[in-house]
Amino acid sequence: MSRWTQRSRSSGSAGFGYAGFEQAARIVGMVTASFYVPRMRTARWRRDTRENRLKFTPLEFETVYFSGLSATELTDVVNLAKNVFNAQQ
C-alpha cells in the first residue's frame, strides 16, 4: 500500500482523526440519532427512542442482602436505590 493511500485511509474524510470506538460510536449516535447495543463481537445499532433504549439496553444486576431490616426500612432502601440509580422498575 502506498504512503498516500495509507494516510488518506487513516485520517478519515470527516476529520475525526484517530477516534477510538467509544468516541466514534458517540459521534455516529449524535449524527444519526441512534445508539449501539454491544453483542459478543458485534454491535447492533437502533434508532434512539425511549422504547428502544428500554427494550435493547442490557440490564445490569447486583444482589445486595439487607438482613435485620423491617419492611418499612427495606422499602425505604429500595426507593432510595431506585432514585439514586434512576431505575425504572
Image (spheres, rainbow, N blue to C red):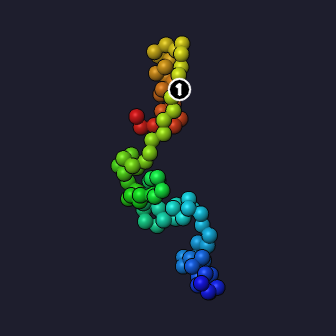
Asked whether the viewer can see residue 82, the reply is yes
Q: Is 76 positioned to the left or the right of 48 in the image?
A: right
Residue at 51% over, 61% down? 25
Residue identified by numbered label 1: 64
Q: Is 47 positioned to the left or the right of 13 in the image?
A: left
Residue at 48% over, 56% down? 41
* Place of residue 47 in the rendered image (x, y in percent of width and height, measured from the top left): 38, 59
Residue at 45% over, 41% down? 59
* Place of residue 55 in the rendered image (x, y in percent of width and height, measured from the top left): 36, 47
* Place of residue 34 in the rendered image (x, y in percent of width and height, measured from the top left): 42, 60
Where does the C terminus fall, quadrant-wise? top left
Depth check, front residue: 13 or 10: 10
Q: Residue flagged by tag 1: what amino acid is it? A: Val
Where does the N terminus fall, quadrant-wise? bottom right
Residue lying farthest to the right in this orientation: 3
Residue at 48% over, 26% down? 78
Instruction: Tell me: residue 10, above or below residue 34.
Output: below
Residue lying farthest to the front in this orientation: 1
* Place of residue 32 in the rendered image (x, y in percent of width and height, measured from the top left): 43, 65
